[in-house]
Amino acid sequence: MTNTFHTKDLSQQSFLVTGGAGFIGSHIAEYLLKHGAKKVRVFDNMVNGFQQNLETLQQYPAFEFVQGDIRNAEACQQACEGIDYISHQAALGSVPRSIKEPLYFNEVNVLGFINMLKAAVDNKVQQFVYASSSSVYGDEPTLPKREDRIGNCLSPYAATKKTNELYAQVFADVYGLKLMGFRYFNVFGPRQDPDGPYAAVIPLFVKGIMKNTPVYINGDGEQTRDFTFVENAVQVNVKGMLTDNEAALKKVYNVAIGENYTVNYLFNKCREQLASNFEPTYREPRAGDIRNSLADISLAKSLLGYQPTKRFDDGLIETIEYFKHKYKS
């Protein structure tokens, strides 16, 4: 990641990244470490985190790791001690899994979130940013998606993220916590987990094509997504934590590119880049899935100076190169 997303000197600042051993969190932590932060503490229970990501971060002397669970209020308090800025990425992610395990999702995504907000207030954290999701748009049909128009949630996962946004507003209003949230649109990139029953679409496609194992496309494959390279998510987290713009606080922002592509297009791009003629298998559409997704990113551009640095095709090339290296054995 060669782009720089901050102007402040980070050498006097301490950061906490929850879920920092995971996909997006490890990229945020690595950016802060690379740019000379005084301390970057990762707080992760290692359910969705990877030792390999921690090993990447351990090369930096300012790195600290605290193993713990956001469902434990005391652990959250300890993780926030001496911290200036928090990027809260720890959560459970999958729509289908949330339909199977709604109570678990509520515990982690809602109770865990409140624990972190309370700990941030108690430890006088300067600024708090958190991961929301484009799933909160639910059945709102308008494209592109604008932050002020949301519909009914289509899954327990979406409901937990919408609840996070409500609690964030309350903690800003009642306790004066400076915060903002980010509605991620289909973030992808290196380190995304291709294994497990709820893996994301891009690593699944790449792994399946490379290993000649079945690749499934839900429905007709003509559903669209605003696929967003992980560097753009890092950018908005860094800018959000460090902004002095009061008008930017107490808001939720779309984090995307502002372009959408069909799942069929994505599959063909993966296949093309891997020089394969592998065929996908089509199956029933998934419950709780949104048909079309496209973000209006003008709010993040105007209030945070967000500007996507890597578009879909370039991000996909970088991602596939990473997986080629990972799976060449």
Image: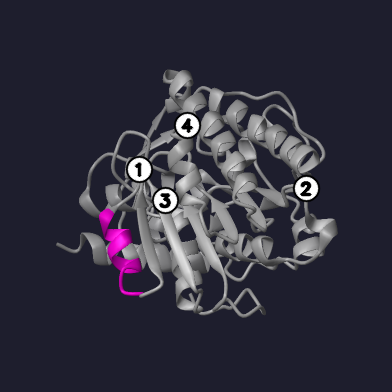
**Magenta stretch: includes residue 57:** yes
Which residue corresponds to mark 2? 250
Q: Nearer the viewer, residue 172 or 48?
A: 172
Left or right, residue 321 beside residue 223: left
Q: Find the distance from the CA under tag 4 to the CA under tag 1.
A: 11 Å
Q: Find the distance from the CA under tag 3 to the CA under tag 4.
A: 14 Å
**Circle 3: element type:** strand
Q: Is residue 93 visible?
A: no
* Residue type at tag 2: Lys
Q: Find the distance from the CA under tag 2 to the CA under tag 1.
A: 28 Å
Callout 2: few (<14), some (14-19), or many (20+) C-alpha neighbours within 10 Å?
A: many
Q: Residue at x 38, y 53 (%)?
A: 192
**Circle 1: element type:** loop
Indicate the quadrant containing the C terminus: top left, top right, bottom left or bottom right: bottom left
First in sequence, mark 2 or 1: give its number.
Answer: 1
Left or right, residue 104 beside residue 298: left
Check the image and name the residue furthest to the left: 329
- The quadrant in which residue 46 appears is top left
* Residue type at tag 3: Phe
Which residue corresponds to mark 1? 45
> How far across and down, in percent of the image, does residue 142 sit?
78, 36
**Circle 2: element type:** loop
Q: Nearer the viewer, residue 154 or 23?
A: 23
Q: Nearer the viewer, residue 290 or 12?
A: 12
Label annotation for residue 108: 4
Name above or below for residue 177 compared with residue 321.
above
